[in-house]
Image (tube, grey):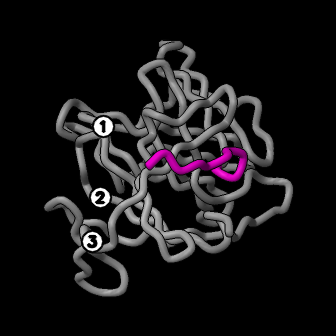
Amino acid sequence: VTLENEGMVFMEMDSFQKALIIIKLGGQFYTIDDSLITINNKTMPLTTLSPQDVIWENNDSFEFKQSAFSKVIISKEAPNSSYPEPGIYVKSKSSGNEMAMVFYSDTNLVGMKLTGSAHVPSSKTTFTFNMETNELMVQHANKGFVSPYWSEDYKMVNITKYKFKLDNHKNSKDDSVYDHISRFVPFVIE
């Protein structure tokens, strides 16, 4: 049983906090805390949830600890087999890990935040990259998603099937590496 093929992913919509990702895999619920993911050895701890803690609203959404979670539709379609694999990615940068859902809109590789930050909340587009023109835009905002704007201070480098890097040529602490979730080994910690 693998997350990419048989799991369901749920996220908190429009969260400005380090939100939880909840997955349903093999009939069991787990949380993924992106701060516990280890990039170097590609491990992803999962914490078991009790099914009684999940209050279903419909087939695609539920409440957990007074927060609403919605199902994430994961596209597996890529316009070219040599392009990066769509799906869930772990984003690592100097301030820690985040998670994003990466998909295609025509020939644009698009990243949507699954975990939010104080500046850009979950469910917002974090980057778009045109695979043909190599134009890359990354969304920034002031705290609370005030005055959002698209930065062109980045360039896409080291792009492979399951990994890519966004380099900020004005501020290297904003550089980020995206690794496809299929490259990580999940293990249950509780």
Q: Which residue is mark 2?
A: 12
Q: Residues within 10 Å of mark 3 (few under 14, many from 20)?
A: some
Q: Which residue is mark 3?
A: 54
Q: Nearer the viewer, residue 114 or 30?
A: 30
The residue stretch that appears in magenta: 181-190
- Alpha carbon distance from label 1 to label 2: 12 Å
Q: Is residue 176 above or below residue 49?
A: above
Dot placed on the residue nearer the N-terminal end, 3 or 1: 3
Left or right, 169 with reference to 57: right
Percent of width and height locating residue 58: 28, 86
For badge 3, the amino acid type reads Val
Q: Residues within 10 Å of mark 2 (few under 14, many from 20)?
A: many
Q: How many marks?
A: 3
For badge 1, the amino acid type reads Ser
For badge 2, the amino acid type reads Glu
Please check the rendered image and state whether residue 189 is part of the magenta-colored stretch, yes or no.
Answer: yes
Instruction: Tell me what residue is drawn at x 36 percent, y 61 percent.
Output: 49
Q: Nearer the viewer, mark 3 or mark 1?
A: 3
Which quadrant: the N terminus? bottom right
Instruction: Tell me what residue is drawn at x 62 percent, y 62 percent.
Output: 104
Percent of width and height locating residue 108: 62, 56
Instruction: Tell me what residue is drawn at x 22 percent, y 69 percent.
Output: 63
Q: Nearer the viewer, residue 138 or 24?
A: 24
- Alpha carbon distance from label 3 to label 1: 24 Å
Q: Is residue 108 above or below residue 89?
A: below
Q: Residues within 10 Å of mark 1 (few under 14, many from 20)?
A: some
Percent of width and height locating residue 146: 18, 38
- Alpha carbon distance from label 2 to label 3: 13 Å
Cβ–Cβ under 8 Å for marks 2 and 3: no
Residue 117: mark: 1
Q: Nearer the viewer, residue 181 or 28?
A: 28
